[in-house]
Image (spheres, rainbow, N blue to C red):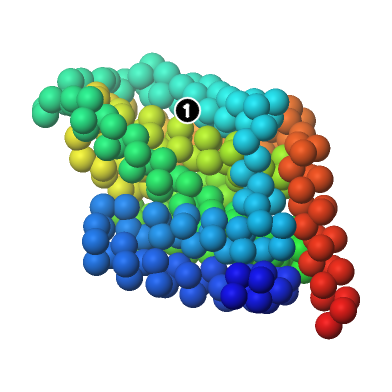
Amino acid sequence: MIKAVSHITTRWWSRILLFFLLWFLFSNVEYSIYTEFFPWLSCIAASLLTEYLRLGRSVVGLGLALKKETFWREIFWGAAVTFVGLGAILLIAVVLGARFKSAAVPFGIDVFGLLFFKMLVLASGEEFLFRGIMFQAVVERFKAPLAVVLSTIIFIYGHQGNPGATTISSINIALANLLFCAMYLSTGSLWPSISFHFSWNFTQALFGLPVSGLNFGRSFLKMDIWRIPENMRWLVATNEFGIESGFLTVLFLIVTILIFPRFIKTSAFASARVFKRRMLEAEFTAKI
């Protein structure tokens, strides 16, 4: 049975169909058991299983190599870029008049752990969805530009319903997606984009800021950005969408897109595994 599925997944379109089928099945199970992380846990599970069922039996080709020579470097760069950029934006916000204040409700280790895991699942799930099976299948069949365009359109659409979505927020969402795509395409790994995505969302949630317009409840501190004079507020945040509706985020994302690929390159180990799997699939399809 597994061998038959592996043969089916040699086609790019069949992997996409299998991914959606598994996501649908897993989502129903997840929803019936626990909805706290719905539907992202099931998205992650469907992605991993779809990739594992391909010829070669490995998830490394999805962009998940665990080689210590590259893994920690990729995690570091994703988080470091986030903290430098987000730190600069928050510092400017404080200079302009924003202030931190203590959260109204105590923030214990249990709340910290739940928020950490929730943000990790959310960031990982979105990266698996937008840079995983579908994205990589389109890259393989139609090349990267089309995959990036389709991914960006869907990524923007997926955030349009969030509170406070505006033209500027859509520009930032599009730029963020372009950055995540650049991270994957320049490294062949999902770790940098997962690290960046998680660090960005988690830090905002810790400071009580909206994450793409969404509020995640209790926070470590509360940053009041509405104390910034109205005529300067556009630099940081224009509404309840948060700093992703501000002009400083536009600048940060553009600069990062331009410079990030210069600092980190594709893992030779991951490239070899991808090449081996593609050779196996090409040999099989040539016999059909």
In the picture of the structure, the residue carrying the numbered disc 1 is 86
On screen, residue 92 above or below 195:
above
Q: Amino acid at mark 1?
A: Leu
Q: Is residue 254 above or below residue 174?
A: above
Q: Position of residue 265 (x, y in %)?
A: 77, 34
Residue 19 visible in rendering: yes
Name the side, left or right, on which 260 lies relative to 141: left
At a point 26% along the width and 52% down the height, the residue shown is 36
In the rendering, at what x and y percent does residue 128 appear? 54, 54
Q: Residue 189: where, in percent of width, then height? A: 66, 43
Tell me where residue 70 sits by quadrant. top right
Q: Which residue is found at the position 18% from the left and 20% from the top?
A: 102
Residue 184 seen in this snapshot: no
Q: Secondary structure at mark 1?
A: helix
Q: In this rendered view, identify the residue nearer to me: 175 or 141.
A: 141
Which quadrant, please, contains the C terminus?
Answer: bottom right
Q: Residues within 10 Å of mark 1 (few under 14, many from 20)?
A: many
Residue placed most toward the observer, 113 or 45: 45
Placement of the N terminus among the 4 image quadrants: bottom right
Question: Residue at image x 30%, y 23%?
Answer: 98
Which image quadrant is residue 284 in? Answer: bottom right
Please give left or right for residue 8 compared with residue 288 in the image: left
Q: Is residue 82 left or right of residue 14?
A: left
Q: Position of residue 140 (x, y in %)?
A: 76, 63
Query: Does 34 appear above or below 72?
Result: below
The residue positioned 49% from the left and 40% from the top of the image is 197
